[in-house]
Amino acid sequence: METKIFAKDQIDEAVALLREGELVAFPTETVYGLGAIATKEESVKNVYKAKGRPSDNPLIVTVSDEKMVERYAKSVPDRAKKLIKHFWPGPLTILLFVKEGSLPTAVTGGLKTVAFRCPDDKLTHDLIAKLGYPIVGPSANTSTKPSPTTAQHVYHDLRGKIAGIIDGGETRVGLESTIVDLSVETPIVLRPGEITPEEISEVLGEEVLINTGKVSDKEIPKAPGMKYRHYAPSAPVVVVDDVNDFAKIDFNDHIGVMALEDELDKIDLPKANKFNLGRNLVDADHNLFGGLRYFDDKKDITQIYVQGFNEGQASLAYMNRLNKAAGGHHF
């Protein structure tokens, strides 16, 4: 299969492919998503095949607006409307009860809930609006690998497996959206992202919990990213929580380091063995997956040390992804 890359003025071609049941990757402000019409079960099943992803992991349903949510959610409660008004379009995914029979099991994982997201990306908004249907939107990468933040990352992983990629340039945020579960009495953040639990709590005027538990092998996760190993390059990743510990590492030409600019300058390694995460945590969020992919393409790298952060809720998303990439291994 030829994988076409579409420019911004070729949305209609991408819409036509989706209507035919094909898979098309699309840009968002977080990471690139892999799109198929959410009501077409066979197309959705092909998303799992293309990614090599377990089919018991539910998929996010990407919509153009709140009205589209109303077609597939059992109801849109007041607290959901508050969050939609404040954060959409934007990097917040909202878990609601699904309207029975409105979406295939391949989307919901057999659960009574489904996650809805409205990205802050005009290309994708126009794509879904023209299509007239929501699309599923897992990250457009090979399962367990770092999420894609450019069209080139998608092409690297899924060339020949999907019909097209809409090139919207590099993503702004670089980490997936926050997922908040509103199907429970007390809202709970199932996956941290740019929007923090504190910000959600402020808008809702009530307590918001943070999920810290793991899903067992026999359980169906309520949202993506809760069960399986994620975001991992081929070489093992180790988190360095204290930047002073970089001085204790016995560096050699087979070691890669990802850290902020100031820390990298202190490390005696060839330039090719170092990846600059930027100047602050916001930069690091944006660059984390790019760095993991950078070293994934370097077959002579056998170990990757990555700077960790402890900045409260602001660093929750970064550390969530990094810990999954490292399998919990810390220096």
Image: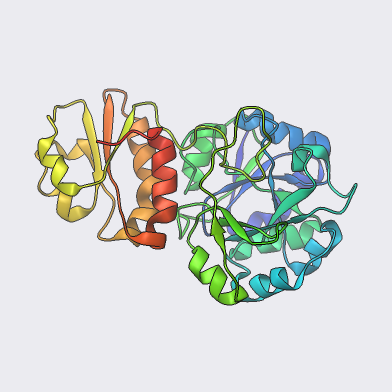
The reply to whether residue 195 is in sight is no
Tally of numbered discs: 0
Q: Look at the picture and state if 252 lies above or below 150.
A: above
> Where does residue 157 sit, x and y in percent of width and height?
52, 33
Q: Nearer the viewer, residue 131 or 302?
A: 302
Q: In the picture provided, is 76 more to the left or to the right than 157? A: right
Query: What residue is drawn where x is 61% and y is 40%?
Result: 4
Instruction: Report whether residue 243 is seen.
Output: yes
- Residue 107 higher or lower than 42, as above or below: below
- Indicate the position of residue 185 as horizontal and vertical percent values: 70, 61
Which residue is more in the foreground, 44 or 193? 193
At 61% from the left and 27% from the top, the residue drawn is: 217
| Picture layout, residue 60 above or below residue 159 | below
Q: Position of residue 174 (x, y in %)?
A: 45, 53
Q: Nearer the viewer, residue 285 or 29?
A: 285
Q: Quadrant of the C terminus?
A: top left
Q: Is residue 10 left or right of residue 233?
A: right
Q: Quadrant of residue 224?
A: top right
